[in-house]
């Protein structure tokens, strides 16, 4: 990143993840002036592997919506969920990986959600893990996840 004052090279002194992306504090290596840049993350080229072996571009918005589903009716704000999604994206970008399994993303989300809202984390785990505790690769949560009351479903109801 070029220094806006003298055009010299800059180095990053601090990176913060915000709800919108990354905020980096930089210092010019030539004139020593400080400035701040804001970056929207795009996770360029990062791919997600699904269970059926298909691959799709990483989409933080999709991850955010998955988190919204498991956090429904909980007290976590959208800003917090967006920050979790961005933080995961930043972690994946920083790791330098070109592809990631959906299950790895779920694990990262579980780590973060447990600190914010253990109940939402449990829901996420229930949606994405099987009886053995292994993460399923399905990308979508069951549509009826929160409405079930444990009543037996019968076929002769209609
Ligand atoms: Zn400069």
Image (cartoon, grey):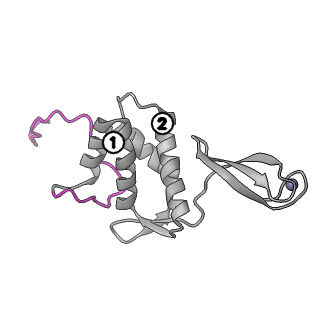
What is the x, y in percent for residue 27?
77, 52
Q: Residue at x 44, y 66 (%)?
A: 100
Q: Is residue 143 visible?
A: no
Q: Main secondary structure of the magenta part?
A: loop
Q: Quadrant of the N terminus?
A: bottom right
Residues drawn in magenta: 132-158
Q: Camera-side residue: 129 or 108? A: 108
Q: CA–CA distance between discs 2 and 1? A: 13 Å
> Left of 22 or right of it: where is 1?
right
Q: Camera-side residue: 13 or 19? A: 13
Q: Camera-side residue: 91 or 123? A: 91
Could you say which quadrant of the image residue 51 lies in?
A: bottom left
> Left of 145 or right of it: where is 151?
left
Q: Is residue 60 visible?
A: yes
Counting other residues with Cα less than 10 Å from the Cα at mark 1, is it few (<14), some (14-19), or many (20 or more)? few
What is the x, y in percent for residue 25?
70, 48
Q: Is residue 123 above or below residue 46?
A: above
Q: Which element is circle 1 on?
A: helix
Q: Camera-side residue: 143 or 46? A: 46
First in residue order: circle 2 vs circle 1 = 2
Q: Which element is circle 2 on?
A: helix
Q: Residue at x 13, y 36 (%)?
A: 150
Q: Residue at x 20, y 36 (%)?
A: 148
Q: In the rendered image, which residue does mark 1 sit on? A: 114
Q: Is residue 83 magenta?
A: no
What is the x, y in percent for residue 14?
64, 49
> Left of 135 or right of it: where is 77?
right
| Mark sitting on residue 27 | none
| Mark sitting on residue 80 | 2
How many numbered marks are there? Answer: 2
Q: Residue at x 41, y 31 (%)?
A: 76
């Amino acid at each position: 990143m070029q220094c806006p004052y003298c055009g010299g090279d800059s180095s990053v002194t601090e990176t913060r993840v915000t709800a919108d992306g990354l905020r980096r504090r930089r210092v010019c290596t030539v004139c020593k002036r400080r400035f701040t840049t804001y970056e929207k993350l795009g996770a360029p080229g990062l791919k997600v592997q699904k269970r059926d072996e298909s691959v799709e571009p990483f989409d933080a918005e999709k991850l955010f919506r998955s988190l919204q589903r498991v956090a429904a009716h909980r007290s976590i704000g959208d800003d917090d969920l967006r920050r979790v999604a961005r933080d995961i994206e930043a972690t994946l970008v920083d790791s330098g990986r070109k592809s990631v399994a959906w299950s790895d993303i779920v694990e990262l989300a579980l780590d973060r959600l447990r600190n914010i809202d253990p109940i939402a984390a449990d829901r996420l785990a229930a949606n994405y893990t099987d009886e053995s505790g292994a993460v399923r690769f399905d990308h979508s949560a069951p549509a009826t996840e929160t409405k079930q009351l444990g009543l037996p479903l019968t076929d002769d109801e209609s």
